[in-house]
Amino acid sequence: MKEFTVKISPLTPIWTGDSDRKNTVLRETGIIGSLRWWYEALVRGLGGSACDPTSDNRCPDKNGNHCDVCELFGCTGWAKKFRLEVQFNTAIPELWIGTREKRENKYLKRNVAGFMSDGTIILKFVPLREITPNEWALLNKTLQIIANYGALGARTSQGNGVIEIVENNLPHRDETPERSELKGSGNKAGLANLNDFFFYKFYIKFGEDIINLIDKRLFWTHQPDHCGFTDDWENWKKLWSNYRFLPIAFHIRDAVRHLEDNKNKRHEIFGESKKGSRVFVSHGYKLDDKMVEIRIWGYNVGESIKNKIKKELENKLKEKLFSKKEYQQYLEECILKDEKCGRQLLEGSE
Ligand SMILES: [Zn+2]
């Protein structure tokens, strides 16, 4: 049978681990789960039906019908139409960033980890049943949105999963998904809908080569009274020199979080209760020796926080990126380079 492959190159590490935080094997399930999540958002945006496969609101519904997403990804009583195989991976050296605030009287640590690659990672789509042209078109569109504006895999609210598509030989890749072919049956869940998304890309330019800033240990990594925390500047260097990214997603997240003054709202948007975050940020991936690009995107967050991100990110980042105030001068510029709303992506005006 013909092989359908997409070659990708990770710009920030891909995380596929389960909730036990182990990430030792690149698991297809983590990639499939993420593909499905974006596919759901796209299908909802186009007016189709998408259930919540993680809740009781999953398909089949009481009449035995399933939604437009389960049609491709499968559910109880309806087999999925393809299998995904992922080839090749390299785990990056791990490093840790402490929390800025104490939780239950102590600081916690958050790790930067995941898979990158010396070459490309190959996603192989193996059809098990006939996939319709429209489903291929939807799948292609999903991959495009992920590569151009979002991220793939898990922990995408903490920097992981920015990818570039190096080669795509899936069929129907130049076709626009047809709304009219979505059936709209089965269960529906009011979750992420592409219509409600925003996507930003910023350039962050430093006044000196980033490798020098790492050498001088200027970046913030933990609070001075965080007992037992040890820095790993060698791994900072490796991530930048070998893997071309600067592990600053937690810094960016901290900066963006504090743009929302209302504590309840903050918890709701950034997922500090049981719910997941509705704001996602990337690490800084390399543009040149002094400059990185970052992504910030999300959905259902309201206009006020979106505007604040645009207007106040630079100042907040100055506070959060460095360990001392006198280092703030090293952040030269933080420029909004690209801004899209989900509706534009749905209309194809990218
Ligand atoms: Zn479903």
Image: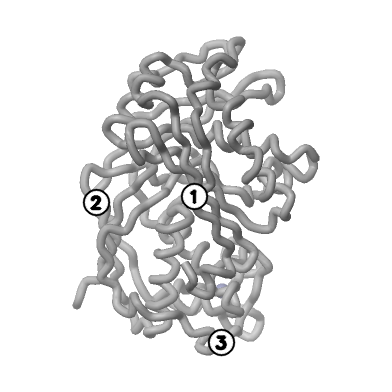
Q: Which residue is mark 2?
A: 120
Q: Which residue is mark 3?
A: 183
Residue 79 image position (x, y, % from top left): 43, 76
Q: Is residue 287 left or right of residue 119?
A: right
Ligand 1 sits in quadrant: bottom right
Q: Is residue 166 left or right of residue 73?
A: left
Residue displayed at 38% across by 80% down: 175
Between label 1 and label 3, give the one nearer the viewer. 1
Evaluate whether residue 244 shows in this view: yes
Disc 3 residue type (three-letter): Lys
Residue 96 image position (x, y, % from top left): 47, 25
Depicted 124 relative to depicted 219: above or below? below
Q: Secondary structure at mark 2?
A: loop
The answer to which of marks 1 and 2 sits earlier in the sequence is 2
Between label 1 and label 2, give the one nearer the viewer. 1
Residue displayed at 47% across by 37% down: 204
Depicted 29 relative to depicted 15: above or below? below
Which image quadrant is residue 291 in? top left
Disc 2 residue type (three-letter): Thr
From mark 1 to mark 2, how far is it between C-alphas? Answer: 26 Å
* Quadrant in which the N terminus is drawn: bottom left
Evaluate whether residue 40 shows in this view: no
**Which of 141/51 is in front?**
141
Q: Secondary structure at mark 3?
A: loop
The label number, if any, that marks residue 337 in the structure image = 1
Q: Is residue 226 left or right of residue 212?
A: right
